Amino acid sequence: MILRWILALSVTVLSVNGWTCNVIMCDHTNTNNSQIYCGGDILKAVNEAALFKDSKEFVDMPLKFDPETTIADFEAEFNGTETDQIDPVKLQKFVDDHFYPAGHELDECVPAGYSPKPDKLMAIADDNLRDWALNLNNIWSHLCRKVSDNVTLHPELHSLIEVPHEFIIPGGRFREPYYWDAYWIIKGLLASEMYEAAARMLLNYKSYVDRFGFIPNGGRVYYLQRSQPPMYIPMIYEFYEATKNITFVQKLLDSAEAELNFWDTHRTVDVSFQHGDYKLYQYNSASNVPRPESFKEDMATANATSRQSCDLWSNIASAAESGLDFSTRWFADKQSLETIETKQIVPVDLNSFICWNLEILTFLYEYVGMDTVKADQYRQRYITHRRNLQKVFFNETEGAWLDYNIREKGHNPTFYASLAAPLFTNCYEKLDSNKAGQIYDFFKRNDAFNFTSGVPQSTLKNSAQQWDFPNGWANVNHMIIEGFRKSNSPQMQEEAFALATKWVRGNYRVFHTTQHMYEKYNVVGAIPQAGAGGEYNVQEGFGWTNGVILDLLVTYADRISVSDGDKTAAAAGAYISSGLGLIALMIPMFIRA
């Protein structure tokens, strides 16, 4: 039975519109349950029957029995019936009998080093913002999870990948660790002085590198064919800057190099531009089947076009690797997902992150690893890559860094907020004091600063994608703010403070209206609200949003404040919340009466 099951993994295929695709998100080389969580008839049948509103719900459900038994029971129960012909009622019973609810494999926890009143947060001058920061500090305990013992004993029963320590989840449907989210989560933990919690998260990411040779998109087996923006090395740097813990950071250097080697080996592209040849980086997942966590959505996209499905799905997976899933930035026609061409795009932000990785490794090997040979090697790579980034991506006409499109052999002039990434990573010549001003002018020309609560991800309207207008995202707004703050220009540093004030006040208003923090915000209008668009409803929590706010409040602790209008809104929100709570308490009394 086991041999037959393993052999089946190697021939898993999916045919749509005449195209046969066979690179699934996980296989027998990296997990022993891929025919449940990454491919196979059960996954297909559950999604064709639309048993769950959110495709991710099913692939997060732990098995009650081993994969072989589950597959055998499915075959016996439905006896070769075409997956789209299976009775949904019987299928639901099969799922109920063979799977536990999603989240069953995770235990709640209190983050190591938690304190209800950390000194850094108590130093925030504004009373209202200080109280809010302490509220957000408490949310870390609600977002803390650890892998249950059963995952360690029986990994084959779970899509969750075991990690040795507790971690902070983003929130909502995102029940597991994610890669680039963790940079801003760790920034928040450092602001909350939870140094041990941050260290344990770094050890979890080290464990991914040690096991798989890279850090997957998230902590599930169905993410094993793609990564996310490479922020592990910046996480290590931020931890070192906050703690100066040389001994701990030394233990992470080998995994940091291995993580960068993954990008060097699997995510480079040769670009010929203006009589020069350059080695650059792009998002490029090998997977060419529907994403298990978005199976229904990917099938619907394929069925809406005559385009080759394998190529479509591979470009979709590559966009998911970017963390910006989805945005018109990746679409050939700037309108429809069916035209997605992520693999034709060489992104500014990814190459900026790689640039930062190289600079940080130069620093860490010189001052932590005490290895001047390696430090010099990374320094030369950093200088070369920084120069190449300026040559290929900086557009003199626009006065900004722009994505390069391989198919079009030129720049994409459309505004996207993430184009500010080279400022954030300092991947430009430091003596070029005008660079921050040029980027500011580019943003201003594109009306990016015209909104009361932050910078939207793009200014292209009506795309219905979550990484487009009118949504603003905490991590990208943080990159913009930090990019201007770290520049040599006093004027740009003041603009950074103005943008930070906008973002903080907008988040503050929403929190005191809803008592929630969200993954994204609609930044348009006098009163901001939770964002919308994309494949799922807006999620609460929220890890990186909280981390950004706490970092900004600590950075500007002595000068940032809420307006009188914000105070009034907060008071009204508190009144409404308390009123709703009182009503909730009184309802049972009326029922009993």
Image (spheres, rainbow, N blue to C red):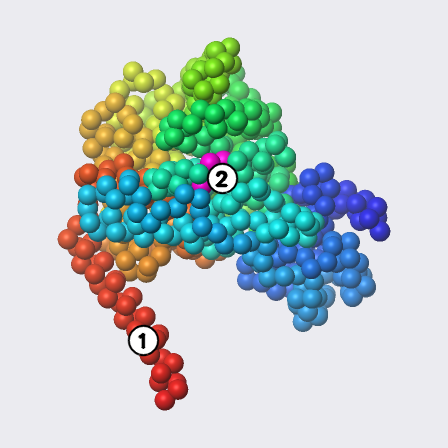
Q: Secondary structure at mark 2?
A: helix
The kind of residue on which mark 1 rests is Ile
Name the main secondary structure of what is drawn in magenta. helix
**Residue at 72 percent of width and 45 percent of height:** 32
Residue 198 counted in the magenta span:
yes
In the foreground, 168 or 37: 168
User: Of label 2 and label 1, which has the lower sequence position?
Assistant: 2
**Residue at 62 percent of width and 54 percent of height:** 59
Q: Position of residue 222 (x, y in %)?
A: 62, 46
Reply above or below: 337 against 529: above
Q: Mark 1 = which residue?
A: 583
Quarter of the picture holding the C terminus: bottom left
**Residue at 41 percent of width and 37 percent of height:** 195
Q: Mark 2 = which residue?
A: 201
User: Which label was assigned to residue 238?
Assistant: none
Q: Is residue 250 visible?
A: yes
In the foreground, 572 or 480: 572
Magenta-colored span? 197-202
Residues at circles 2 and 1 in contact by the CB criterion of under 8 Å: no
Reply above or below: 114 against 102: above
Relative horizontal placement of residue 12, taking residue 562 as reference (left or right): right
- Look at discs 2 and 1 and give the one toward the viewer: 2
Relative horizontal placement of residue 324, taking residue 500 as reference (left or right): right
The kind of residue on which mark 2 rests is Met
Residue 23 counted in the magenta span:
no
